[in-house]
Image (tube, rainbow, N blue to C red):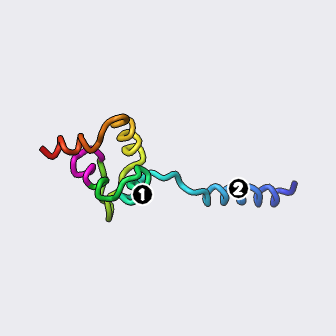
Amino acid sequence: KHVGQKIFEHVKEEAKKMLEPLPRLLFTVPEVAAILGVNENMVHDLRKAGLLKAMKLGRYKIRKSTLEAFLVQYDGQDIGEILSETAV
């Protein structure tokens, strides 16, 4: 191959890498609600009760790792019961 052809192929590969989507690190409240199969108010209730940490970047965002940890921590538990206990 010509040097020019090798350079072209290298640049083409680098451009493909740059166009690949970045991994999702943050989810919005509506996205988390859809993932959990609940409404957005429930996500806000979980946030306000301190069960699901969120950060405010314009709107509330939940880190992917935080959501995964939440699912592991509360697996098999009745979240409604936990929420009612935290409200007391």
Is 80 placed left or right of 3 in the picture? left
At 82% from the left and 56% from the top, the residue drawn is: 3
Q: Quadrant of residue 70?
A: top left
Q: Which residues are magenta?
A: 45-52
Quadrant the N terminus occupies: bottom right
Q: Nearer the viewer, mark 1 or mark 2?
A: 1
Q: Quadrant of residue 59?
A: bottom left
In this view, the residue in front, 11 or 39, is 39
- Is residue 46 located in the magenta-colored stretch of the structure? yes
Quadrant the C terminus occupies: top left
Task: Count numbered badges in the picture.
Answer: 2
Q: Is residue 73 visible?
A: no
Q: If you read the primary sequence from the N terminus, does the residue marked by circle 1 or circle 2 appear first? A: 2
| Residue lying furthest left | 88
Q: Determine whether the residue tagged by mark 1 lies in a helix, strand or loop.
A: helix
**Residue 32, position as x, y percentages in the image:** 39, 53
Give neighbour class at mark 2: few <14, some 14-19, many 20+ (Cα, 10 Å): few
Q: Is residue 25 visible?
A: yes
The kind of residue tagged 2 is: Glu
| Residue lying furthest bottom | 58
Q: Determine whether the residue tagged by mark 2 lies in a helix, strand or loop.
A: helix
- Is residue 47 located in the magenta-colored stretch of the structure? yes
Number of the label disc, if any, that sits on residue 13? 2
Give neighbour class at mark 1: few <14, some 14-19, many 20+ (Cα, 10 Å): some
**Residue 50, position as x, y percentages in the image:** 23, 46
**Residue 53, position as x, y percentages in the image:** 29, 47
| Residue lying furthest right | 1
Is 22 placed left or right of 41 in the picture? right
At 21% from the left and 47% from the top, the residue drawn is: 49
The kind of residue tagged 1 is: Glu
What's the CA distance linking mark 1 and mark 2?
A: 32 Å
Number of the label disc, if any, that sits on residue 31? 1
